[in-house]
Image (cartoon, helix red, strand yellow):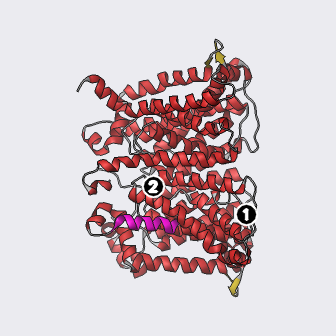
Amino acid sequence: MSETTLGGLAGRMPKFIRRADPAVLTAFACIVILLLLGSLYSRSFLSPEYLLQQLKVASFLGVIATGMMLVVLLGQIDLSVPWAVAAGAMMACAAAAYGPVGIALAIPFGVLCGVAIGIVNGVGVAYLRIPSMIITLATNAVAQGLMVVYTGGFSPQDSATAAMRYLATGFTIPAVPNAVIIWALIGAAMVFILTRTSFGRAVYGIGNRERAAYLSGIDTRRIVMIAFAVSGGLSAFGGVLLAGYASKAAQSMGDAYLLPSIAAVVLGGTSILGGRGSYLGTVAGVILITLLQSILSVMQMPEAGRQIIYGVVIVAMLLLYGRAPASR
Amino acid sequence: MKDWRYWLAEQRGTLLAFGIFIAMFAIYSGNHPAGFTANVVQTAANKGVLLAFVAMAQTLVVITAGIDLSVGMIFTLTNCMASWLVIGTGLETAFGVLAVLGTGLICGAVNGAIVIYGRLQPIVATIATGAVFFGLALLLRPVPGGSVNEDLADFLTGRFFGVVPASLVALLVVVLVIWVPFSRSEFGRAAYAAGSSETAAYMSGVPIRRGKFFAYVLAGLLASIGGLFLTFFTYTGEAAYASGNAYTLFSIAAVVLGGVSLFGGKGSAIGAIFGALAFRTIGDLLFVFDFDPLWQPLFQGVILLIAVSLGAFALFRVRNRLEWFL
């Protein structure tokens, strides 16, 4: 549509705008609008300290949404985020109880637990052909059950290690929080994988038509499984960072990340049906969601109002540009 | 083939769910300290019926090849609403019940409109509307509380003639009034047809949009009946996020156990009801065998995982590998 009707107009625009996805542009425009609205409400909204603080908070969601995006690009969905996040955080903190070796291995162990959850998801989706939204709900329930049994209803060892706190809240480069650097590194790696490797091409291919990708000689089942494992690992890593940020792990810490991570990916223009989307869009989606949350909390909106506005905004934005094509 | 064999093939999932339920309930009541008494049956029925209503709601949507991840939140919202409205004189209570059921209808209609006319994916759309419904529930009940017309509540959660649990009778009435007419109506057939093959249904001139919309609306209504009964059992309203989510999750488990295909077009709400009752009984088995209640979430999760993995057996029947990819 855009090529034909907007051809004359777009021809005069700079190249990078012409090539950009309208959904990504819309998301960035919404970010600017939110910033302006926020600055009307409070002067400090546009100060560098506040914006960096927002970016730091956004980076936890950003890490989790990166994994979610990979899965959504395949045309699947990962609903095991809540307990993958919690399991990553809790297991990392639990490992820290086992002496210096445990402390050293805390972060890899937490991430590994997430990868394990992701592999169960991946085997279910890729090899057993169970719809992803069902199997990931089931593994989420199992992960929850395991964590409840492990903690015995209370938290045995739940304080984060110094390394986790350093990753989440420290500064390696002055003024730039470590969490933001981590998100940038993970994001850069994801962009590289998606655009420069055969794995990334295969992900887009499977998202468009798995049958065609399979007939082109791609081992689609292995790719799908790896994608789910990566998503689980990144969710758990997000949990590790969150535990470092709050300096402890809690059972329900992941609940608040399922809807935002899906929303960030979808608002960033990634098609929920798979095969289409850019990481830049996900970045925009993550920042958009974080700013929205921040403004609502600055306005001292109670939890009820936040949930309602959240749901309404997501439905409204999806209706703007996330609709499936009219059939027939 | 004879007629009865067709019938058997069609009802296989339902009959299997019925069998599982009977077996599980026999183990449950056999090992229950009180044995198979009216009290045990009543308690089990009251717990099972709640999930049965939500599972019926989920079935209607799953039949159209969709999914409703907001059923648990509609259930929670209507619970909170009933704790305000279903109180007072007979007439006030009646209006309260109507308002609660109307809310369920509206919630379902919102989901249906967004999914069908807004052309959004059911998963994302219903997660988002679920957040809205939960927000509304929280607005109604920031802290647990409220009350309900206790005469009505006791009547509907007690026993008829000292033996028949009233909640089971209510479930039967709902099946006869909502599910049977729907599944035999033009819209019901349209919902099945749309779930089975939307393109073929469209080509045959089946009113798929209206059929699907109707399924979502009735799903909202059934979830609100569940919410109403929750209020009758607990006498209070509570906007509990975890419980709402758990009901959504369990409803999917019940639907799968009940032989309803998640790809749409196959199964019945009767099967889902037995799936729900079986799932509840399995969850309660832990108690009669004196396990630590801490293990219950894990146990239910594992059952859910096994139940959804059973669908994978269909893979053995696939002759052409390309059929792996729908």
The foreground one among B311 and B286 is: B286
What is the chain letter for disc 2? Answer: A
Question: Do badges 2 and 1 share one subunit?
Answer: yes
Is A230 placed above or below A176 here? above
Residue identifier under label 1: A298
Q: Residue at x 48, y 59 (%)?
A: A121
Is B87 placed above or below A202 here? above
Query: Is the stretch drawn in magenta largely helix, strand or loop?
Result: helix
Return the residue found at the far left: B1
| A292 left or right, relative to B3 | right
C-alpha gap between disc 2 and disc 1: 37 Å
Question: Of the residues under marks 2 and 1, which one precedes in the sequence?
Answer: 2
Is A130 placed above or below B153 here? below
Image quarter for residue A132?
Answer: bottom left
Q: Residues within 10 Å of mark 1 (few under 14, many from 20)?
A: few
Query: Could you tell me residue B67's position as x and y percent?
Result: 46, 45
Is residue A286 visible in the rendered image? The answer is no
Q: Which residues are magenta?
A: A219-231
